[in-house]
Image (cartoon, rainbow, N blue to C red):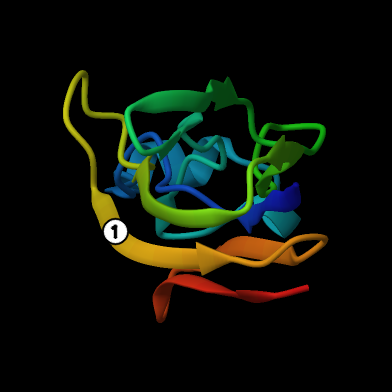
Amino acid sequence: MAVVRLVISHATAKIGECRQLSPEEIANLAPNMRRPTECPRERHNLFVELRLNDDLLYQGMERPTGLWSDGPSNVYRKFIVPSGHHRLVVRLRDSGRESGFDYLHTEEIELQPQQNFVVSFRSTTGFSFGEG
């Protein structure tokens, strides 16, 4: 047997766009709160799916952390799987779209007995697979 770990900490897209405040709206703000734009802080939920061969290992939606739901969404899961040759598919949706995925990666892997294999994600580089 081997271990596959899904480890993701990712800040998804913000729910809305910034908007320009009118001069009247700016004037109604306290002097120390006056700014030309208003930007939402809340982020979309993170949806992740992990498959090994044709088996669904994980499918879940994680909410953003933080008091205003403006922090990263976190996924940490561990799966005990048979060693040997496998097809690993990981998909991620972070934009708030209703269906489909924003990121998708498929890789053929060879798991050794007692191997600790990590699947992680960075918004700048995408998915990465390797030893943990």
Q: Quadrant of the C terminus?
A: bottom right
Residue 15 in the figure: left or right of residue 75: left
Coordinates of residue 59 in the picture (x, y in percent)? 50, 22
Q: Does residue 34 sit above or below 55 in this rendering? A: below
According to the image, label 1 marks what residue?
105
Residue 22 in the figure: left or right of residue 64: left
Residue 119 in the figure: left or right of residue 3: left
Q: Given the image, on which type of amino acid does mark 1 rest?
A: His
Which one is in front, 102 or 104?
104
Coordinates of residue 8 in the picture (x, y in percent)? 64, 54
Q: Residue at x 60, y 40 (%)?
A: 29
Other-residue count near label 1 (Cα within 10 Å), few / some / many at <14 / 14–19 / ≥20: few
Kindly state the secondary structure of the residue where label 1 is placed.
Answer: strand
Residue 31 in the figure: left or right of residue 13: right
Coordinates of residue 11 in the picture (x, y in percent)? 56, 53
Q: Residue at x 71, y 32 (%)?
A: 68
Coordinates of residue 65 in the picture (x, y in percent)? 75, 37
Q: Residue at x 32, y 64 (%)?
A: 107
Which one is in front, 38 or 35?
38
Total marks drawn?
1
Q: Residue at x 76, y 66 (%)?
A: 115
